Image (tube, rainbow, N blue to C red):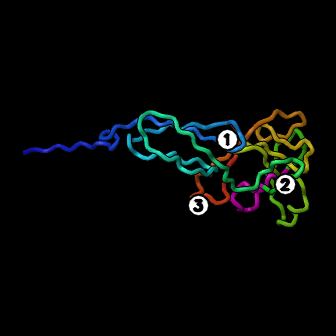
């Protein structure tokens, strides 16, 4: 007697249907959609999104359907919600190795990376302080305390006096397994 074995995926054994999860962030009209295949009869299981928390929707998959998920931001920093009361912080770009810090030089110049003498010198220089406004879904605008124009724009993090509004998005660093206070800013979606 001869036997042959074939690998069969569980989804091939159970009827899978496409479920579209629409994520809504409190305070914004922007949504993000994720489509997944789930087994009919299984509980809803919305995929996780970085930098937000939510409660899994209740109910079971009955067929192809749309499910709304309400999210709350869960950021690694305190964002600025009012530019009259900004939340300033220094931005270290190399995980606190050699203190490579963002440093504003002047309008129409790229942001510099400076290695300050010590942390006390950072606290005395407004060029090291930045704040972020916006949200996870729409992106963030980045402002510098020393610059009265504040916002950086899209061209290689260049400061300009007549900037065009540009948003930056957060992503966890791939090299960061612990995901603690380590994230990247990138342009576009």
**Which one is in front, 87 or 21?**
21
Q: Secondary structure at mark 3?
A: loop
**Which one is in front, 27 or 138?**
27
Q: Which residues are magenta?
A: 91-103
First in residue order: circle 3 vs circle 2: 2
Residue 106 locus on image (x, y percent): 90, 44
Q: Is residue 120 above or below residue 130?
A: below
Q: In the rendered view of the protein, which quadrant contains the C terminus?
A: top right
**Which one is in front, 156 or 82?**
82
Of labels 2 and 1, the one closer to you = 1
Q: Secondary structure at mark 2?
A: loop
Of labels 1 and 3, the one closer to you = 1
Q: Which residue is mark 1?
A: 137
Q: Which residue is mark 2?
A: 129
Q: Is residue 93 magenta?
A: yes
Taking the spot 57% from the left edge, 38% from the top edge, the residue there is: 22
Q: Is residue 20 magenta?
A: no
Q: Are marks 2 and 1 in contact (CB under 8 Å)?
A: no
Residue 65 locus on image (x, y percent): 48, 34
Taking the spot 71% from the left edge, 39% from the top edge, the residue there is: 28
Taking the spot 87% from the left edge, 62% from the top edge, the residue there is: 123
Cα–Cα gap, marks 3 and 2: 26 Å
Circle 3 Cα neighbour tier, 10 Å, few/some/many (<14 / 14–19 / ≥20):
few
- Is 44 positioned to the left or the right of 160 in the image? left
Residue 178 is tagged as 3
Taking the spot 67% from the left edge, 41% from the top edge, the residue there is: 137
Q: Are marks 3 and 2 in contact (CB under 8 Å)?
A: no
First in residue order: circle 1 vs circle 3: 1
């Amino acid at each position: 007697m001869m036997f042959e074995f074939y690998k069969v995926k569980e989804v091939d054994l159970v009827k899978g249907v496409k479920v579209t999860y629409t994520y809504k962030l409190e305070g914004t009209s922007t949504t993000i959609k994720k489509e997944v295949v789930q087994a009919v009869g299984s509980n809803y299981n919305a995929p996780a999104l970085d930098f937000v928390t939510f409660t899994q929707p209740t109910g079971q998959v009955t067929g192809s359907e749309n499910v709304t998920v309400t999210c709350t931001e869960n950021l690694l920093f305190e964002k600025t919600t009012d530019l009259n009361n900004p939340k300033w912080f220094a931005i270290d770009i190399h995980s606190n190795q050699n203190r490579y810090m963002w440093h504003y030089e002047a309008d129409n110049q790229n942001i510099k990376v400076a290695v300050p003498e010590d942390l006390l010198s950072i606290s005395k220089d407004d060029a090291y302080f930045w704040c972020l406004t916006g949200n996870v879904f729409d992106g963030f605008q980045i402002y510098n305390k020393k610059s009265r124009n504040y916002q950086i724009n899209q061209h290689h993090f260049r400061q300009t006096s007549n900037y065009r509004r540009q948003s930056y998005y957060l992503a966890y660093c791939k090299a960061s397994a612990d995901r603690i206070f380590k994230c990247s800013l990138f342009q576009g979606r």
